[in-house]
Image (spheres, rainbow, N blue to C red):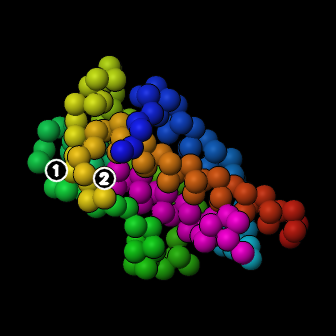
Amino acid sequence: MIEPLPKDELHARLSATSGILHSAFWGKNRAAVNYKPEGDEYGKYSPLEALVILQHAAEVFAERVQRMVKGEDVPETRDYNPDKFLEKIDIEDESVKANLREFMDARAKLFRALFPLKEEEEWDKFKIRHEVYGEITLRQLLTTHLQMEEELTKNAVAILKEYELHHL
């Protein structure tokens, strides 16, 4: 069972990610964003890989939420698999600027879908079938998304800071 966060906390923490990402990636060179320290203290992704995953996941989840809120027939949702996504792209073709912009666009799409939902009960009336968790509410879906988002963001920020300490 996923313990959902309160809607106001979800909104605040989802809102914060944009600023954190902009601040972390501002002015960073290609070597910094592609840096992967030895070991797995900060996960397995470079900051750029994490940003690309975040952008893609933001789009996927915004579309899921839009469909849920519009009352469209939403098929069972699959667990988000960042590794499977990364296999399909060439990271060397990815741009920090473009991914930040697309992340912001996806986040705005998510917030537009959520805007009409004023009460927490409204967030809980929308349900989706998830391949791992079974039937979950909108708040539960966004809580799982936020957990992944915060972990990737925290690791990307830490790697960028480590790179600055050792390479500049």
- Disc 2 crowd rating (10 Å Cα; few below 14, some 14-19, many 20+) is some
Which three-letter amino acid code belongs to the residue tagged 2?
Tyr
Q: Position of residue 31 (x, y in %)?
A: 72, 73
Q: Residue at x 40, y 67 (%)?
A: 81
Name which residue type carries label 1: Val
The dot on residue 74 is 1
Q: In the figure, is residue 168 to the left or right of 111?
A: right
Look at the magenta stretch and give its main secondary structure.
helix
What residue is shown with label 2?
133
Quarter of the figure with the C terminus:
bottom right
Residue 37 position (above or below residue 96): below
| Closest to the observer, 25 or 142 | 142
For label 1, the crowd category at 10 Å Cα-Cα, with few meaning under 14, some 14 to 19 and many 20 or more, is some
Membership of 153 in magenta stretch: no
Q: What segment carries the magenta color?
A: 39-61
Horizontally, residue 73 falls left or right of residue 148, namely left
Q: Where is the N terminus found, in terms of image quarters? A: top left
Q: Position of residue 38 (x, y in %)?
A: 74, 77
> Distance between the Cα atoms at labels 1 and 2?
15 Å
- What secondary structure is marked by label 2? loop
Classify mark 1: helix, strand or loop.
loop
Which picture quadrant has residue 108? top left
Identify the mark nearer the N-term, 1 or 2: 1
